[in-house]
Image (cartoon, helix red, strand yellow):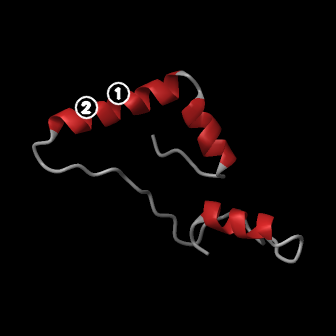
Amino acid sequence: LEIAPAAQIIVDKSRGRLGISSTRLVYPLPLGIYVAKGNTELAEAIKATLAALKANGQYAALIKKYNLESID
């Protein structure tokens, strides 16, 4: 699988039958959040929420929990 968190979930549910052979992604793909052009209210709300998650440590905890890499 190309999505590390999905691969980890499958391994966790395999009861020892599967394992991860490499922690290096073959095709890393950054993802983003998109909003409709002109929807500045939603865009600002998302930015504020993300900033709050970073400030209180929840963002880092989620990155670690799901074996992700932050791109900022």
- At a point 51% along the width and 22% down the height, the residue shown is 55
**Which numbered dot is residue 48?**
1
Q: The residue under label 1 is which amino acid type?
A: Ala
49 with respect to 1 (left or right): left
| Residue 22 rendering spot, x and y as whole percentages | 74, 68
- At a point 23% along the width and 49% down the height, the residue shown is 35
Q: Tell how many labels.
A: 2
Secondary structure found at label 1? helix
Q: Among all residues in the image, which is located at the extreme left?
A: 38
Task: Between residue 2 and residue 41, name the one nearer to us.
Answer: 41
| Residue 2 rendering spot, x and y as whole percentages | 57, 72
| Residue 64 rendering spot, x and y as whole percentages | 67, 43
**Label 1 crowd (10 A; few <14 / some 14-19 / many >=20):** few
Q: The residue under label 2 is which amino acid type?
A: Glu
Asked which quadrant contains residue 6, the reply is: bottom right
Callout 1 touching callout 2 (CB < 8 Å): yes
- At a point 67% along the width and 68% down the height, the residue shown is 7
**Label 2 crowd (10 A; few <14 / some 14-19 / many >=20):** few
Q: Label 1 to label 2, Cα distance in Å? A: 6 Å
- At a point 64% along the width and 36% down the height, the residue shown is 61
| Residue 47 rendering spot, x and y as whole percentages | 33, 33
**Which numbered dot is residue 44?**
2
**Which numbered dot is residue 31?**
none
